[in-house]
Image: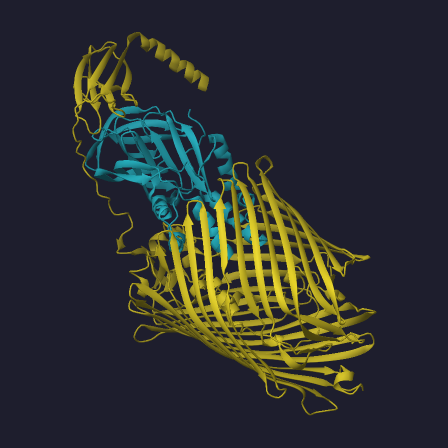
Amino acid sequence: MKKILLIFTTLISITTYAQNNLNYKLIAKYNYQKQIDSTDEKSKINLENYSLYLNEDNSLFVSDNRIRLDTILNNANFSDLDKLRSLPKPSSNKRIFKSTSSKKITIYDEFYDNIYMYNDTVNMKWKITNIYDTLNNMKVRRAETKFRGRNYIAWYTSEIPISDGPYKFRGLPGLIIKIYDSKKEINYSLIGLEKYKKSKSLNNNYDNEALSVSKSEYTKIKKNFKQNPIPYMESQGAVFSEETKRIIREKFRKRNEKTNNPIELKENDE
Amino acid sequence: MKQILLMFSVCIFSINSFCQTNIIGNLKTKKNKPISGASVTITVVKTNDILNYAISDNKGYFSISVNSKVEQLQLNIRSMGFKSIVKIIDNKTQTSNFVLEEQITELKEIVIKNSPITRKGDTINYSVNVFTKQEDRTIADVLKNMPGIEVLDDGKILYQGKPINKYYIEGLDLLEGKYNLANSNLPHKEVVKVQVLENHQPIRLLDSLVYSDQAAINIKLKNSYTFTGQAEVGAGLSPLLWDTNVTPMLFSKKRQMLTSYQTNNTGNNVVKQLKTLTIDELLEQFERNDEKQDWLGIQQLAVPNFSEQRWLDNNIHLITTNYLQKLKNDYELRLNVSYLNDCQQQNGFTDTQFFTANDTIALFENKYNQLNTNTLETNLTLQKNTYKNFLKNSLQFQGFWDSQRGNIQLNTNTINQNLSNRYFKLSNNLKTLFPLGKQIVTLNSYIGFNKTPQSLVVNPGQFNDLLNDTNDYDQVRQNIELQTFYTNNSVAFTKGWKQFSFSPKLGIQFEKQNLKSAILTSENTTNNFKNNLDWTRSKLYFNLQTQYKKDKWRIELTTPVNLHNYQLEDKLLQKGQNLNCVTFEPRLSLNYDLTSFWRIGSSANLSNQFGTINQVHYNYILQNYRSLQRIDAPLPEMQNIGYSASLGYRNPIKSLFFSLIYSNTKTYNNLLYNNQILDNGATELQAIVQDNNRFSHNIMTRASKYFSDFDTNLTLSANYSLQDFQQILNSETTDISNHNWRFSGKIDTDITDWLNTELESVFQFSNNETQGQNNQKITQQFHKFNINIYPKENQYLGLKTEYIKNNLFAENTENLFADLVYRYTWKKKNIDFELQWSNILNTNNYRTVNINNFSYIETNFNLRPTQILFNVRFPL
């Protein structure tokens, strides 16, 4: 029992962040739909909502479940242990931090007790068309781009003159309202826009806890974890029985087989 | 291809560059602050046709190139919080700076639409037929298709990635944690709707007070009655083997039933399935100390220290049934009954040598043991769970009609042992929650009675000197009966304040026991060597648990204060003892994170332990045919002082892990035990009042590294432990120290994604030092090599090999095992076929050695021979 508690408290200590805040006045909420198995059209599922927190200089794109977890973790005391354990798990732990002043995007990802931080340089070239439509009562315009192995169709509005969007997408003369790839396997659509008169703040600084790595190092670590979770976890000090290992291995095999459709099919820009 | 494309685009670019104009500029506020993130678009005049655009940088600069032959261009500037600018400019390279006027950009707020799944409050309804695929059979299959719901291979259901906290069928919780039995067997055709109850708090009283983020699942049935189930049949050689499992079930809105019958003789100990205890339950059980206890025994064979399936010779039948009935006024009644019948056999021999001060006594025993288990367990639970109160009362009965027979060939003599080790327990556990001010108080009350009417009969009679005036005799019989009453009652709550959390708990324990025992011989049928001991124990306790957590610190302090009272009296022998004392048993633990890679921790604790009734009895008890025991001594009292320190390093970037843990414990005892070894090998245990200490040190280290280039994980570990203590051997106080070393290494490689190998080696060395003299070292080696192959998704092939080598003094023993498993799943019908070939090399004998301070015991255990088993699992 004590051991379990200890393990659990260690987990919390790692995921508690320093109090550096991101101020924002606007949140764009996106619904994320993904076909997790590229060979099975029925595997198209609605994942939880994602939010894009915006201020003049920066933006942060993150899953709502992740934020809910963080909010509790930041104010955690021991009586919250059960609550923590029972929170829904985010479909992605990634926090995507964009700054208007830089082409670099900083990505924080968390898996099995560690937070990794790396920079990604994205060069997105948009082709703006003369096709218009109306979405959420806004006049939207169609733009197209290629990004790491997929062709995307984006609908943006110049009514909201913010050059940002979900995930790593940005660079249009207005906010992206909807973006999907040509096979409709990835689909983000705006479902809400919340604005605040006074700016609100969100804990953002992972830097104290995060391990800074290069993008290629990150890719390698993540690949190791996904393909060989047992050695990864064992090399972090976990101990499993033979039977547990067999179960974990089969579970990951099945999961990998079904979740075979990442957003980025290629590592780098073309 | 890329190159050609590149060249091509360069050409186009260069041609067009003849008529390219560059428009650069700067955006500022009236206060001269740069405006970043503004969109600057160049369009064809009075249209929306974008020629090019740019986003201003953090200094407010933008730069746009235009390839167009038109004479004029329209420049549009838009930015959040500023008035938009539209300006017609000439199509020529130029610098245009702008000062933007601040203006609140009115955005239309968009209120989040309902998600595609309709909901009613916290309840989400999934209609089953929408999510059913053709090949789906059970409700578990359909659950897998429902968005947000995940079913793991072990049957656990996740909603939004988190395990559900309850699985109801028509609002009733029949199986608690064992819901997979129903989920994986209930055909989806019987189900009309699956409901997800979000934020489900199983205890309704806490509903508005303690927030729950866990969901529960409720299965709505189509018909008022549903009958279904699953079955598994297996058969094999040799001798004739069987392994069968039939599980029918019945569900309705007011009444539910699930029954399972399992039988096998393949060494599969299915008893384990009945035990799904939570950690809290285990802790409670430990405190109660009222699990079945055997006072008497036959001479056992030491069982091998590897998988039970290799040596367990069983014949087991298990019937379990679970029944739930809904009553009036929100009460639910649940009855769980299980009956177990098992007959196990053990065959082998032991070679025992006792070292006495001046002699070595040798015993060679050939053993054939039969162990019969006959157990009935019932649990009747009444529960009321409403928004106003919570009450759960469980009435439990356990009955063990166990018996054992042992046949020993000792040198040339035959010794028969007949044991009846029965045990009966009746207990009641009440848990209720009620509000008191702002707190919800938890009240627990446990009351239990139990008795152990046990007897051991040995032919011929033993201990002639003591029991029959040195003459040989035919038979000796030991009778014993212990009766126990135990109750434990407590009140508790938890309060949080800033970084602290406090959990006080107040309670009282009370125990009353009576031990009666007597020895009868064939020559003398009046009861001799009687014990009639009354034992009363009470404990009043108050425990405050305080936790503190901030930044990199985690501190936990528990400060229990206990008031103990012990009263022992044997009226017949006119002996007894009273003990009153107060103990304070604090425990402090500290943890600190040095960096993100390094962390340290330490703990210190003080604790007290007192003996139990089987450690004090004033007259002799024949525990087994060659052990006669009397403990005419004060109650054992022990005080432990323990320290530990740990250091950990964890670098996930390099996939490197290292840990070092040191702990030491010092125990003060008030008693020393004297093992008197008689010439025939019989032992007599007596306790002597003499303060003594026991020290133990333990140091453990482990390192592991993952080599991603070879998909290989390497783990190394080492362990050293030292124990120093005193013991009386044939009336002499002896200093003893035990040293143990353990080294292990493991290599795990994924050669391809369908082939995985595991190699593990363990070396163990133990050394015993008596009175400064070294005894011989024992070395044991375990090596394992496993291959796992997944040729296709629905197939699995596993080959396991195991090699065990023991260096026992001058002798060596070697054992090699190999097993093969093949599994095929017929997905369409959801039928599993499995072929197991165990112990391929037919290794039929295993030899182990046990050494303690006064004996050397070598055991030969007969193992299960090679066997082939074919298994089919299918739905009813």
Q: Is residue B628 above or below residue B825?
A: below
Across and down, in percent, residue B601 comes to 52, 49
Across and down, in percent, residue A148 comes to 41, 29
- State the residue at coordinates (31%, 76%): B328
Q: Residue furthest top?
A: B18
The answer to whether residue B492 is seen in the rendering is yes
Task: Give B593 or A212, whichever is nearer the viewer.
Answer: B593
Across and down, in percent, residue B487 comes to 46, 76
Q: Which chain is yellow?
A: B
The answer to whether residue B852 is seen in the rendering is no
Q: Quadrant of residue A269?
A: top left
Q: Is residue B269 left or right of residue B384?
A: right
- Report the number of numbered marks: 0
- State the residue at coordinates (50%, 73%): B564
Q: Quadrant of residue B346?
A: bottom right
Task: Give B744 or B534, whichever is nearer the viewer.
Answer: B534
Across and down, in percent, residue A244 comes to 55, 53
Task: Give B310 or B510, whichever is nearer the viewer.
Answer: B510
- State the residue at coordinates (81%, 78%): B413
- State the residue at coordinates (31%, 36%): A22
- Hue of chain A? cyan
Q: Is residue B626 left or right of residue A29?
A: right
Q: Is residue A253 above or below residue B398?
A: above
Q: How is the image coloured?
A: by chain
Task: Give B446 or A46, whichever is nearer the viewer.
Answer: B446
